[in-house]
Amino acid sequence: MDIDRIKRQKRKNVQEQNTVLRDSIAQSARWFRDSPGEFAWLIDLLQERDLAPERGLLVNIHIIPEQEGDLWRGLWLSGEEKFYAFDVMRSREDGSVLEVEEWKDATESFPKTAHARGTGKSGAFLALEILREGVES
């Protein structure tokens, strides 16, 4: 499938919606894997919490400019198949972590459904597929 064509479509069927979501998750995971220097702060936070960065994947990440710095809001899927939501404020000057505003086990908030009516596979189900297959997918 031509993912760029599908993304431009206004109306997407369930399979196309799943394809776009899966691609978005895989892009976040590849960005983390391919840019360890940019994510050294996240690697440190994961290791502090006994989570192995090499066994999990970054499901999504959003950078929100704030007055104090940049808020990095994301979702991590561990090798143990648990989802962790986080909000981390980082300095724009040196990239240091100013504050971990939130770090919580959000596993129960993400249904792992393979066949939801109207949406097909849930985002959590797609993330688990990518984790199990490896980030190369």
Image (cartoon, helix red, strand yellow):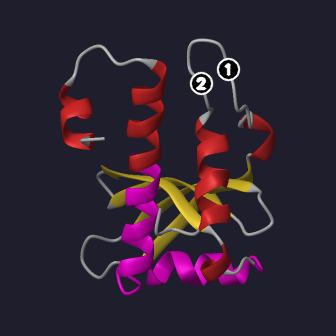
Query: The disc labelled 1 sits on which kind of residue?
Result: Ala
Helix, strand or loop under label 1: loop
x 51%, y 53%: residue: 74
Q: Report the residue marked by disc 2.
A: 120
Which three-letter amino acid code belongs to the residue tagged 2?
Gly
Above or below, 40 relative to 77: below
Figure quadrant of the N terminus: top left
In the image, residue 2 above or below residue 111: below
Q: Nearer the viewer, residue 2 or 23?
A: 2
Between 32 and 45, the one lying in front of the other is 32
Observer able to see residue 61: yes
Instruction: Point out residue 64 in the picture as x, y percentages from the top left corner.
Output: 33, 49
Q: CB atoms at circles 1 and 2 under 8 Å apart? A: yes
- The local secondary structure at tag 2 comes to loop
* Foreground residue among 103 and 8: 8
Please report the bounds of the magenta region as a residue range.
Answer: 24-50
Q: Residue at the location (57% across, 69% down)?
A: 134
Q: Residue at x 53, y 66 (%)?
A: 99
Q: Which mark is residue 116?
A: 1
